[in-house]
Image (cartoon, rainbow, N blue to C red):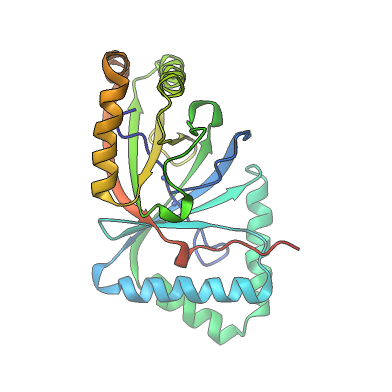
């Protein structure tokens, strides 16, 4: 699947610290909702931004904050933080948990961190996405282990009005073809919700680095052959626009609560 890709994170460090990266890829997944926040960080403030995120990680760890996020950095100085939530109602619980965290931190420390954090970026774009397992592809024997992944490509597929169902069926055909050809590289697909230019899906794929990603993609395309070309033509006919971005996962800026 040409450049199928992943996506975003982080809800704002005020009432809640709110990015297409590598999220859970279990064989049997239910549709998962994510809050995705994209921060446009000023190039001169990258170090400050990352320092503030790391400080927040330390506070979350210290006070056992219950909500996780995974971070990625994009090549244009943007950062995405992806927060899994149960549903839209769970956003209230998330905000309450962040407010409770703030109460546990010394007031001056919290406010100083927020001031430095807010001064490091131009704006935040917040959006919601659903991970769609049946349209994602997980190889039986993945070529890469999660710890080997240091490159992500996000593909933004903006679908023509009333063509969403046809696009979804074409995605399932991509999955079937990859299974048939035993392609060792997978992807995750996310459907855009509130805060996105709908209808849109974001597809996340990955590699060790850019050279590994594009060289392996070329090998896979040869294996997929003419059947893939036919699916690409169908796919292109359903699109109004396509964009792609590249970056890398940032485990050093991510947070996973310890299991009880």
Residue 104 location, quadrant:
bottom right
Q: Residue placed at 56% from the left, 62% from the top?
A: 16
On the image, the x and y values in percent for residue 246 come to 29, 48
On the image, the x and y values in percent for residue 226 come to 26, 14
On the image, the x and y values in percent for residue 90 come to 67, 48
Would you place residue 85 above or below residue 114 in this image? above
Along the horizontal axis of the image, is 2 left or right of 24?
left
Dividing the image into 4 quarters, which one contains the C terminus?
bottom right
Nearest the camera: 99 or 5?
5
Nearest the camera: 56 or 258?
258
Residue 97 location, quadrant:
bottom right
Residue 184 location, quadrant:
top left
Q: Residue placed at 65% from the left, 71% from the top?
A: 101
Q: Residue placed at 42% from the left, 73% from the top?
A: 117
Along the horizontal axis of the image, is 32 left or right of 180?
right
Determine the residue located farthest toward the right in the rendered image.
Answer: 260
Q: How many marks?
A: 0
Can residue 232 be seen here? The reply is no
Q: Residue placed at 41% from the left, 54% from the top?
A: 148
On the image, the x and y values in percent for residue 187 come to 43, 36
Dividing the image into 4 quarters, which one contains the N terminus?
top left
Along the horizontal axis of the image, is 234 left or right of 35?
left
Would you place residue 109 above or below residue 211 in this image? below
Can residue 52 be seen here? The reply is yes
Nearest the camera: 6 or 56?
6
């Amino acid at each position: 699947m040409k450049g199928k890709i992943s996506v975003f994170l982080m809800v704002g460090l005020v009432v809640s610290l709110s990015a297409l990266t590598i999220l859970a890829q279990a064989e049997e997944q239910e549709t998962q909702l994510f809050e995705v926040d994209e921060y446009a960080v000023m190039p001169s403030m990258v170090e400050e931004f990352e320092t503030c995120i790391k400080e927040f990680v330390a506070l979350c760890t210290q006070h056992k904050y219950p909500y996780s996020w995974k971070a990625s950095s994009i090549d244009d100085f943007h950062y995405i933080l992806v927060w899994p939530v149960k549903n839209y109602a769970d956003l209230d619980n998330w905000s309450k948990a962040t407010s409770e965290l703030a109460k546990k931190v010394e007031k001056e420390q919290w406010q100083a961190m927020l001031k430095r954090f807010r001064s490091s970026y131009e704006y935040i774009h917040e959006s919601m996405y659903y991970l769609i397992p049946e349209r994602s592809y997980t190889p039986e024997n993945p070529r890469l282990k999660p710890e080997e992944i240091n490159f992500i490509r996000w593909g933004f597929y903006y679908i023509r009005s009333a063509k969403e169902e046809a696009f979804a069926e074409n995605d399932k055909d991509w999955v079937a073809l990859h299974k048939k050809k035993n392609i060792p590289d997978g992807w995750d697909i996310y459907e855009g919700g509130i805060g996105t230019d709908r209808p849109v899906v974001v597809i996340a794929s990955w590699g060790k680095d850019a050279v590994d990603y594009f060289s392996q993609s070329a090998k896979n395309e040869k294996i997929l052959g003419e059947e893939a070309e036919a699916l690409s033509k169908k796919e292109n006919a359903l699109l109004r626009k396509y964009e792609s971005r590249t970056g890398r996962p940032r485990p050093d800026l991510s947070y996973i609560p310890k299991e009880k």
